[in-house]
Image: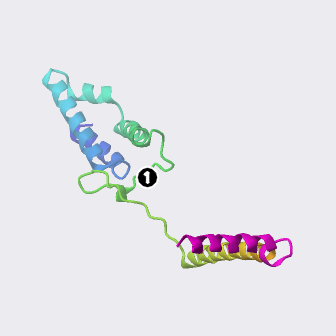
Amino acid sequence: MTQKEFLDVLQRALKGQVAPHVITENLNYYRDYISGETANGRSENDVLDELGDPRLLAKTIIEAENSNRHGKKRRSPEYDSDLYDDEGDRNFRQKSFHVNKWMVFGILLLVCLLIFSILFFVFKTASLLLFSFKGIWVWFIILFIIYCLSRRR
């Protein structure tokens, strides 16, 4: 296997699994590593044998990227292409919660029923107090307050 073949296999194994900028970074790293080692006198075959199978390297890179991205492994190893733009930068799109119009209608209906129940309870209690014989003292207090307020003026 040559350096070009090694990098092509690595690229194909990473494509669609990680962001494009991660692929570029890793391809540049391994290209520089192989070139540096061969410049130091090692044969290309020895360096490639040391690195091992590029598909295994790709699997390690994918797992590391997934665990770095979320602090844990993703549920699906598939790369979500809609999360990245062409340069490989993460697009943080706001996730929206879509509400069905019937759900809104139901919630509004429940709120209206709740308000109606509270008002009914308040008026029923007030009418019992005001119009019962025991609640006659409430009328006297109201009349006394009105009398006091009218005398102040």
Between 142 and 22, the one lying in front of the other is 142
Q: Residue at x 58, y 75 (%)?
A: 150
Please name the residue shown 48% across and 40% down the image: 72
Residues rendered magenta in the picture: 129-153
In the image as oriented, which residue stretches furthest toward the top? 41
Q: Main secondary structure of the magenta part?
A: helix
Q: Which residue is mark 1?
A: 78
Which residue is situated farthest in the left direction here? Answer: 39
In the displayed image of the protein, which residue is found farthest to the right?
A: 133
State left or right for residue 43 relative to residue 153: left
**Residue 66 at x, y percent in the picture:** 42, 42
Residue 116 highlighted magenta (yes or no): no
| Residue 7: % across, % down | 26, 41
Determine whether, in the image, residue 61 is placed left or right of residue 121: left
Quadrant position of residue 80: bottom left
Instruction: Judge whether 72 appears above or below 116 on screen.
Output: above
Callout 1 amino acid:
Glu
* Residue occupying image coordinates x 28% and y 30%: 48
At mark 1, the secondary structure is loop
Pick the quarter of the image with the N terminus: top left
Frontmost residue, 135 versus 33:
135
Taking 141 as reference, is 38 left or right? left
In this rendering, would 29 be left or right of 94? left
Considering depth in this image, is 121 or 129 the residue closer to the camera?
A: 129
Callout 1 environment at 10 Å: few (<14), some (14 to 19), or many (20+)? few
Question: Is residue 131 covered in magenta?
Answer: yes
